[in-house]
Image (cartoon, helix red, strand yellow):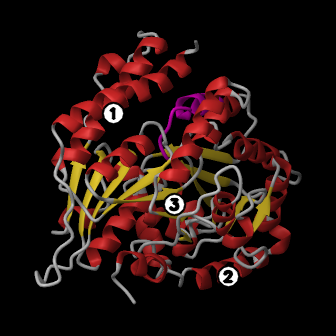
Amino acid sequence: MSALAIILWTTFGGLFIATVTVLALLPSRYEKPSATSGNTSVSVQILVLGDIGRSPRMQYHALSIARHGGTVHLIGYDESPPHPDLLTSPNVTIHGLATPPKILRSPSIPFIISGPLKVLWQVCTLLYVLGYQAPASTWLLVQNPPSIPTLAISFVMSILRNTQLMIDWHNYGWTILAGTKGPSHPFVALSKAYEIALANTAPSANITVSHAMRHELRGPPYNIQSPIVTLHDRPASIFQPLSSESEREAILTALPTTAPFAASVLEGKTKLIVSSTSWTPDEDFSLLLDALVSYAKTSPPPVPIVAIITGKGPQKASYEAKIEALQAANQLPGIVIQTAWLSIADYAGLLRCADLGVLVDMFGSGLPVVAYSAYASFDELVKERLNGSGFETADELAALLAQLFGREWQGEELAALQRGAMYESKLRWDEEWDRVLGRVFGFTE
């Protein structure tokens, strides 16, 4: 039996043991306020089995609920600084999950031992926080993925605490696993069956990030019958277009990542592009890297580029080594690639100052984008040649960069995309959330 299969069995075994324990010490159940009590406040537990500070969509959910007077208990790993408004809101309580002991995270411990023990740790900590630390709530809103053990634990707790379960589908857990272990790995099939079974039975409601994903969940193999609504990612109020060139100068010179190149960017001699990644196999950063290598080889020598890549993740060190090797081999002449992890305020400032984004969720800052267009949801998010452009290969991306930054075009096409992105920046998270989820939670008619 593979180590990953052991983890799945450990999840179910740990879930069974923990469930028996919980049944012996049942947590309090949510009791709907009586019509005469005058208490109509909605309460929501929001769970992300990851770093809260690196989960913007779940943070925005919390802020939207709190803005309407709802009570929020935000549960996750408290590693990176969260949105500052979460820390000052009287309606939001953050419950940090205990991270596994260092010994379980040590590479010296065989995965066949550390993996199952780590899952058991997650099962126990989730049950404790969801069942006993955070009070019973009207709703339990869960981010997926990760699905193991999150979906199973959430399903059990929603039954025990008389809470309605809502899943926010960002992706599928089994497809991410297939990217790391290969689609034929037996654990991928087990993970897929687990996710499908819980998707069919667990949620009272579902959220998707695109209409394309909603369509997939309605059809086989998921065949979800419970309500599904689409909530497109829209920028929060902290993401705003640039107000003046002096603001751009102030931001570029203040950020340590951009300060050395500020003068050249401000003079238009260098273009600033920004991308964000979780440095995981399902986000193939090598595509952007290969495109920059191809772009650098164009003749005549192209406009120099400073590329800032933000995010944290398991493959970051590996790609940093590749970047260093390419630079040492003179494969990136005129190209500077910087990796960074920024606060949300600094990240918003960086987007305001950039010339181009390589991601679809940067319109809030009026930033035009180039994005991978093979996804079914691409046309929902990017309007080709109006606020951005699509690509599927590194060569196509390199050609786009050369076209948008080419001296012979004098920036006309990029300026047109910027105008489209500025129009797109008017579409905001608050309005989208109120329209879609305000009704579900009972905040709006």
Closer to viewer: mark 2 or mark 1: 1
Mark 3 or mark 2: whose residue is earlier in sequence: 3
Of the residues shown, which amino acid type is indicated by label 1?
A: Val
At horizontal 37% and vertical 47% (from top left) the residue drawn is: 154
Helix, strand or loop at label 3? It is helix
Mark 3 or mark 1: whose residue is earlier in sequence: 1
Residue denoted by label 1: 123
Residue denoted by label 2: 420
Of the residues shown, which amino acid type is indicated by label 2?
A: Gly
230 in relation to 114, above or below: below
Q: Quadrant of the N terminus?
A: top right
Please rate how many residues cluster around mark 3, counting C-alpha atoms within 10 Å: few if below 14, some from 14 to 19, many from 20.
many
279 in relation to 265, above or below: above
Position in image of residue 176 (x %, y %):
61, 39
Position in image of residue 348 (x %, y %):
44, 65
At horizontal 74% and vertical 47% (from top left) the residue drawn is: 292
At horizontal 17% and vertical 55% (from top left) the residue drawn is: 135
- As measured in the structure, the alpha-carbon distance from the residue carrying label 3 to the one carrying label 2 is 25 Å
Instruction: Please name whichever residue, 49 or 237, is drawn nearer the observer in this view of the structure.
Output: 49
Residue denoted by label 3: 262
Q: Quadrant of the C terminus?
A: bottom left
